[in-house]
Amino acid sequence: MRPSAPSKNPDGYPVMVFIHGGGFIAGASWNFPYQPIVEKLVKREIIFVSINYRLGPFGFYSTGNAFAPGNYGLWDQVEALKFIQKTVSNFGGNSKSVTIFGESAGGASVSWLTLSPETEGLFNRAILMSGSSQAIWANTEDVVGFSKSLTRELGCDKVEDLKKCIQRSSTHEIIKAAKSFTPNTNRYDSPDFSYWNPRIDGDFVDAQNFDEAIKKAPKREHFIGIDSQEDITFGMFRVHSFMQIF
């Protein structure tokens, strides 16, 4: 959405890009329940953009090495930001004044994007709402094990050409195989929203750990927020300690 009148500023309107949440397995750009907020942003002469990215095994399948490092959903977000840089001026936007923001997995995505050298010059500011790349549900090597389980369910674990085998699998077959996993099998006995998530791969994030990634990250303005009672939801899922998640 954008203001109806042209900007009085020759540089154009500032731009805010929303990244939806959904545990990296659900959600969409149109599923944004904050229409009043968007309308207020537009009234304040801000262009609002919401993007999509691959989810679940389609976005985060990983063999843990260069063959399939994972993080494809995050790469989708990078490509969306590149597209915005190229085209937003056609809609009256200022490509040099871009703020990315998101909540839950969207907030974690924003956090990941701030750590990647691939995002240099794509945005200026970041707002993280109830999400961080360092949250236990937003990064773990467990995704490699889940990917192996998916490979086995697809019957691709003993073939010579793993890539071709997976590519021959239909979307329906991949979803069915992913759903076959027994719930509550991760290390914190938490629900299956954390099966598919980003990981430090040495590629999207050019580092071996978060300390190194933070030191290398481009310097940008950050605004971080969290709700005081948002962890109550996890009480329904037999999580032993809320602090293990946040």
Image (cartoon, helix red, strand yellow):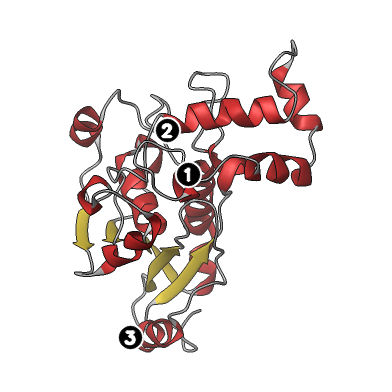
Query: Which amino acid type is marked by label 1?
Result: Leu
Residue visible at 64% across and 41% down in the picture:
178
Check the image and report above or below for 57 versus 52.
above
Q: Secondary structure at mark 2?
A: loop
Which residue has dot 1 on it? 74
Mark 1 neighbour class, 10 Å CA radius: few under 14, some 14 to 19, many 20 or more: many
- Asked if one can make out residue 101 in the rendered structure from this viewpoint, the answer is no
Q: Nearer the viewer, residue 88 or 109?
A: 109
Q: Is residue 187 above or below residue 202?
A: below
Q: On the rendered structure, is 164 left or right of 68?
A: right
Q: CA distance from mark 1 to mark 3?
A: 29 Å
Q: Label 2 crowding class (10 Å Cα cut-off): few <14, some 14-19, many 20+?
A: many
Pointers 2 and 1 in contact (CB under 8 A)?
yes
Label 3 SS: loop
Q: Residue 110 at x, y = what percent?
A: 35, 53
Is residue 243 visible in the rendered image? The answer is yes
- Single out the residue that lies furthest toward the top: 160
Residue 103 or residue 233, whichever sits in front? 233
Chain-order first, disc 2 or disc 1:
1
Residue with the mark numbered 3: 44
Where's residue 103, x and y in %? 36, 63
Decide: is 226 above or below 208: below
- The residue shown at (48%, 33%) is 143
Q: How dense is the environment of label 3, judged by Cα within 10 Å: few (below 14), some, or many (20 and up)?
A: few
**Residue 126 on image: x %, y %:** 28, 58
Which of labels 3 and 2 is toward the front? 2
62 sits left or right of 125 in the view: right
Whether the residues at callouts 3 and 2 have beta carbons within 8 Å, the answer is no
Residue at the disc numbered 2? 204
The answer to which image quadrant residue 104 occupies is bottom left
For the residues bearing labels 1 and 3, Cβ distance under 8 angstroms: no
| Front one among 21 and 215 | 21
